[in-house]
């Protein structure tokens, strides 16, 4: 392929961010509570994650569950946005399964990554056109559905980046990028942490080994070599 394939890693702590950066990640998506798919992190976690030296996308998701938000929930998201800089991962849907265009316009769309709420839209090709019209630079989509990813990439025609996310593993990432032509991938590459939490539940941490394995595979596929940290 000849072009370095960008590797984004979902992390939930400064320690995860450092592990991912050391193992070859190019970009981070920061949240908390990966156990429920990720929620908005804290300002302290964001400051700590930035210390890893990589670009950080910050998740804006006020609660678990679906992506049709009340005005009160939307107000929380917009208030949290005030202390965030850089890109933010947002997903807003209508009850009919469409991109909630009026509400999404209340966010700085040039900084928005439309996250995997996109997997719930009724008509993906129409939805991606809505995002393009809004100036959203990137959309995340199910990394296991290669045929759907190919259709999205073809429809996007370079006007929006398509980021495969969900189900991306060392065992399948080679076929994913070769089949779809995507030049970036996203994964959590998580493992259970040693602290199981007892009755309060366990949590996950980033597996440096999994990130490193994916980085090696992507570099072999692309023919790229890992540059210094500042070139990522």
Image (cartoon, rainbow, N blue to C red):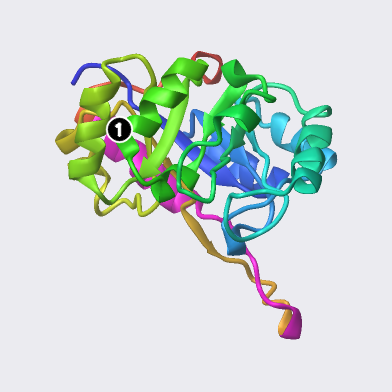
Question: Tag 1's secondary structure?
Answer: helix
Q: Which residue is labeled 1 in the image?
A: 125
Residue 99 in view (yes/no) = yes
Name the image quarter holding residue 71: top right
Query: Which x, y percent locates residue 181?
Result: 21, 28
Left-right relation of 6 to 61 = left
Q: Local crowd at mark 1 within 10 Å, few (<14), some, or many (≥20)?
A: some
Q: Quadrant of the N terminus?
A: top left
Residue 227 in view (yes/no) = no
* Residue 212 belongs to the span the image colors magenta: yes
Query: Which x, y percent locates residue 103?
Result: 64, 32
Tell me the magenta residue range.
Answer: 199-220
* Residue 27 belongs to the span the image colors magenta: no
In this view, the residue in front, 206 or 32, is 32
Count the marks. Answer: 1
In this view, the residue in front, 50 or 201, is 201
Residue 11, above or below 184: below
User: Residue reaching furthest front?
Assistant: 96
Left-right relation of 195 to 126 = right
In this view, the residue in front, 114 or 46, is 114
Residue appearing at x 84%, y 40% in the figure: 44
């Amino acid at each position: 392929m000849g072009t370095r394939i960008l590797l984004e890693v979902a992390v939930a702590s400064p320690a995860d961010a450092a592990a991912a950066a050391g193992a070859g990640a190019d970009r981070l998506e920061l949240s908390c509570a990966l156990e429920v798919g990720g929620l908005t992190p804290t300002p302290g976690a964001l400051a700590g994650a930035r210390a890893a030296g990589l670009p950080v996308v910050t998740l804006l998701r006020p609660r678990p569950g679906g992506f049709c938000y009340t005005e009160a929930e939307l107000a929380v998201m917009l208030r949290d946005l005030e202390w965030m800089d850089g890109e933010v991962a947002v997903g807003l849907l209508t009850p009919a399964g469409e991109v909630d265009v009026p509400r999404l316009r209340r966010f700085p769309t040039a900084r928005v990554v439309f996250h995997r709420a996109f997997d719930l839209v009724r008509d993906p090709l129409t939805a991606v056109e809505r995002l393009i019209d809004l100036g959203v630079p990137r959309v995340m989509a199910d990394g296991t559905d290669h045929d759907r990813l190919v259709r999205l990439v073809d429809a996007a025609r370079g006007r929006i980046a398509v980021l495969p996310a969900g189900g991306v593993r060392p065992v399948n990432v080679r076929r994913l990028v070769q089949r779809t032509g995507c030049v970036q991938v996203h994964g959590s590459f998580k493992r259970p942490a040693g602290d199981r939490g007892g009755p309060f539940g366990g949590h996950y941490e980033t597996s440096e080994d999994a990130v490193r394995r994916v980085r090696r595979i992507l570099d072999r596929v692309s023919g790229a070599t890992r540059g210094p940290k500042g070139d990522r």
